[in-house]
Every structure is written in structure tokens, then in C-alpha cells.
Image (spheres, helix red, strand yellow):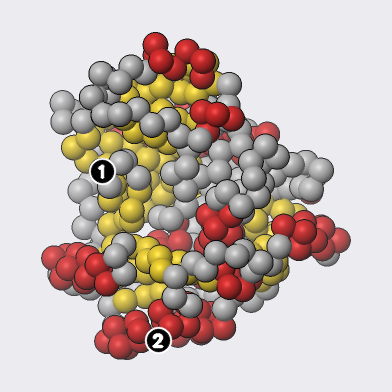
């Protein structure tokens, strides 16, 4: 099977993709609104003929033009919404059109009936639940972790020790909003999810030497296949800030074998679509699986884009990044036009809240910097981030 370049290559015909996390009933609609909308539009750059239920913030004309100018297979059938009510309407319309829905995050069955979905809400939620990793990962690759009641956190996660806190819920909404890293001696500032959940996962804090994102996919035939291995850039808080593609330190063979096996285990119980498995090698040589992300991720889109714009040179260096600003996306793209015309820079997605009913003005732009010299790629990526106080 040829390497996929578009969502249509992976999902096949008559499938609509929804990459927007559900609005959690107990959480104010304004919280994480921008995150949910940005995630919804991420697949547009490589959607081709696959309909995508996407926020109107990601279909701004200048942005779509920039994606097409870069040579990307931009989605031809965006199903736009500007409000929560319009989101539900677009889903209903897609079902009325006879499409099956591929939810990348669990949605309520009242909106997404399981019989009309590529994979059930229960399966999607379970696969992405931070407490489910032991079901799919061989014991030798598991970090030490335990499920703890939130009212027992003070004993299980003391301030004088280092630990990682993860949300143990099938309603995980991604974007690093369900992970909290604590270093020994720092002030404990528990994340919002501890106010909502009754259980969380407390995981050992690892001294990581190398951190990989193993990008895989399961097409309609139910076979798990490798797309690529990437390096992950992680900030001081443990949050993903972008990927490095090409010239990646090779993944140990036994760890790669386990990643393929994990994806196949998920495929065997009904999963279809893209996934990214976060894994690492510690300074003492341990190989561990950190997270299972059974959904379209920040690493998925750049790889499909690279397969499109330079399929014969995927071993050349490139890095992804994200810019956020209050300026309109048209102004941001105008400022970047000289760099885009020089080459070595590709727009892979974006979002402008001005095209929705979100009262907060915020623009997000996803970029891929590429070239032949890894140091030059890093320098240009860093300069872009510095321009916008990233």
C-alpha cells in the first residue's frame, strides 16, 4: 500500500471526519473553546475529498489560499460551523447525507449514533483514556503508574516528590489539557480536571533522554501501518511544542515492533484512522510508552503534507511549530508572505476566532519549516516563534 497523502487515502469514501472534542456538560462553554475549534480544523489541509466538520475560523479565504499555494490537498468539502448549535446541525446534515462519521474524540451518542460511526464513542474514549494504557502495552514498556481517587491525591502525589498527573477519563479532550507535570519541591497547582474527575492517574516522573512520536494509521482493511517516526519537542512543563521530521535518531527495533503491535491491537477491536504513540528512552536506558493518542494529532498533518510536497526527500530535516497572536490571520499571512515566497516554509493550518461567535480575538497558525541543513531549519523556526513571542 502506497504511503497515504490525504485523509481520503486512509479513511476511504463516504466518511466525514470530526476532530473536535465534545463540549463537556459540567464545563463552561467558553473554557477550551478556542482549543476545540482549532482541533476541528486541523485535518483540512490534507482532507482532499473527505468532508470535515470544521470551525469557520479555519476556512478563512487567505488561509485556504496559502494552503493551496503550498501544494497541499486541501479539503474540498468543509462543513463549517460558527456556534455550538451550528456544530450539531453540521453533524446532523452529514448523517442525513448518508455519510459515516469518524470522531477523533468521543462524542455523545445522542449526536453521533454508534451505528453511523466508523468507531464507537466508547472505543475512542477508552483508547485515549490515560488509565487504559496497560490494556494495550506490554508490561516491559509501561511506566509505573497507579489510579488514584482525587480526594487521595495529597498522599499519592506529595509536593516533595516528582510525578506526572493524567486525566483518567474517556472524555479526554487532548491538546495537553489532561496532563500535569510536577517537579519535586515546586508548588503544587493542581489542574482544572482534578475538580471534575473522581479518579486520576499518577505516573512516575521519568528522566527522558530521547522522546519519539511514532505515527501510524489503520486504513479500512484493518491493518496497522507505520507512517513515520518523529522527534518531539517538549517544553519545561512537558507540553508538546512541535515535531522534528527527517534525520530522526532511529527508534530501537523492539520498541518500534511494540508500537506496531499496539496499533494492531487497537485495530483488532475496531479502531480505524490515524494514531500517534508517544514513547521515550530514559537516561538509564529504559524504553517506555508514555501516551497512546488514537486520533489525528499535531504530528499527523505535517507528515501527510510532507508526503505530498516532497515524497522523495522525507529524510531531509523539517520542524513544525505553532504561532498564536491577536492579529487577524490575513495580517499574519501577509507578514509571512516574503518568507513563504523564499521557500522552505509551509502553512499547514490555522484558525481565526473572528469568523466564529467566540468573543476573544485569537489567531493560530501551524507552520512547517524545512530545508537541507538541520541547524538552519531550527534557526528559522526559532526566529518565527520569537517574532510572535511564542
Which residue is rendered at x = 72% and y = 57% of the image? 84
Give the Cα separation between the discs numbered 1 and 2.
32 Å
Which residue is rendered at x = 41% and y = 41% of the image? 277
Is residue 120 visible in this depiction of the protein? no
Secondary structure beneath dot 2 equals: helix
Please tell me how many numbered marks the rendered image carries: 2
Instruction: Write down the quadrant of residue 326 in the picture.
Output: bottom left
Is residue 78 visible in this depiction of the protein? yes
Foreground residue among 35 and 68: 35
> Does residue 266 lie above or below 8 as drawn?
above
Residue to which mark 1 is pinned = 236
Which residue is rendered at x = 61% and y = 33% of the image? 170
Lower sequence index among marks 1 and 2: 1
Say few, some or many: other residues with alpha carbon within 10 Å of mark 2 (under 14 / 14 to 19 / 20 or more). few
Q: Is residue 97 left or right of residue 213?
A: right
Q: Is residue 97 left or right of residue 54?
A: right
Which residue is rendered at x = 37% and y = 23% of the image? 203
Q: Is residue 253 left or right of residue 87?
A: left
Foreground residue among 260 and 372: 372
Instruction: Write down the quadrant of residue 368 in the picture.
Output: bottom left
Locate residue 259, reporting x and y percent: 40, 37
Locate residue 202, reporting x and y percent: 41, 22
Secondary structure beneath dot 1 equals: loop
Report the disc number at residue 334: 2
Locate residue 83, reporting x and y percent: 71, 62
Say few, some or many: other residues with alpha carbon within 10 Å of mark 1 (under 14 / 14 to 19 / 20 or more). few
Query: Where's the C terminus, which quadrant?
Result: bottom left
Foreground residue among 139 and 268: 139
Amino acid at each position: 500500500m502506497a504511503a497515504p497523502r490525504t485523509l481520503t487515502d486512509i479513511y476511504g469514501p463516504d466518511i466525514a471526519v470530526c476532530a473536535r472534542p465534545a463540549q463537556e456538560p459540567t464545563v463552561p462553554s467558553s473554557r477550551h473553546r478556542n482549543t476545540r475549534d482549532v482541533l476541528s480544523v486541523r485535518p483540512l489541509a490534507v482532507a482532499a475529498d473527505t468532508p470535515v466538520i470544521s470551525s469557520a475560523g479555519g476556512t478563512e479565504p487567505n488561509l485556504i489560499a496559502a494552503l493551496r499555494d503550498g501544494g497541499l490537498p486541501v479539503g474540498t468539502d468543509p462543513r463549517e460551523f460558527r456556534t455550538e448549535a451550528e456544530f450539531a446541525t453540521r453533524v446532523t446534515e452529514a448523517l442525513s447525507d448518508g455519510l459515516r462519521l469518524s470522531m477523533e474524540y468521543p462524542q455523545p451518542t445522542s449526536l453521533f449514533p454508534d451505528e453511523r460511526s466508523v468507531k464507537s464513542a466508547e472505543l475512542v474514549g477508552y483508547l485515549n483514556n490515560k488509565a487504559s494504557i496497560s490494556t494495550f502495552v506490554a508490561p516491559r514498556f509501561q511506566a509505573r503508574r497507579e489510579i488514584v481517587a482525587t480526594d487521595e491525591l495529597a498522599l499519592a502525589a506529595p509536593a516533595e516528590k516528582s510525578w506526572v498527573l493524567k486525566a483518567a477519563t474517556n472524555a479526554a479532550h487532548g491538546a495537553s489539557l489532561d496532563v500535569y507535570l510536577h517537579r519535586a519541591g515546586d508548588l503544587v497547582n493542581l489542574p482544572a480536571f482534578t475538580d471534575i474527575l473522581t479518579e486520576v492517574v499518577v505516573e512516575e516522573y521519568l528522566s527522558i533522554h530521547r522522546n519519539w512520536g511514532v505515527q501510524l494509521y489503520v486504513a479500512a482493511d484493518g491493518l496497522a501501518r507505520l507512517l513515520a517516526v518523529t522527534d518531539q519537542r517538549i517544553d519545561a512543563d512537558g507540553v508538546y511544542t512541535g515535531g522534528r521530521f527527517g534525520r530522526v535518531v532511529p527508534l530501537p527495533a523492539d520498541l518500534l515492533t511494540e508500537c506496531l503491535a499496539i496499533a494492531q491491537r487497537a485495530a483488532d477491536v475496531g479502531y480505524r484512522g490515524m494514531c500517534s504513540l508517544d514513547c521515550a528512552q530514559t537516561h538509564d536506558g529504559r524504553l517506555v510508552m508514555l501516551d497512546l493518542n488514537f486520533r489525528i494529532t499535531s504530528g499527523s498533518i505535517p507528515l501527510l503534507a510532507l508526503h505530498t510536497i516532497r515524497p522523495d526527500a522525507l529524510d531531509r530535516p523539517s520542524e513544525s511549530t505553532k504561532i498564536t497572536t491577536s492579529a487577524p490571520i490575513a495580517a499574519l499571512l501577509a507578514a509571512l508572505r516574503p518568507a513563504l515566497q523564499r521557500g522552505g516554509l509551509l502553512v499547514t493550518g490555522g484558525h481565526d476566532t473572528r469568523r466564529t461567535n467566540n468573543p476573544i480575538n485569537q489567531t493560530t497558525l501551524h507552520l512547517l519549516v524545512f530545508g537541507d541543513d538541520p541547524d538552519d531549519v531550527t534557526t528559522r523556526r526559532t526566529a518565527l516563534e520569537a517574532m510572535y513571542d511564542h
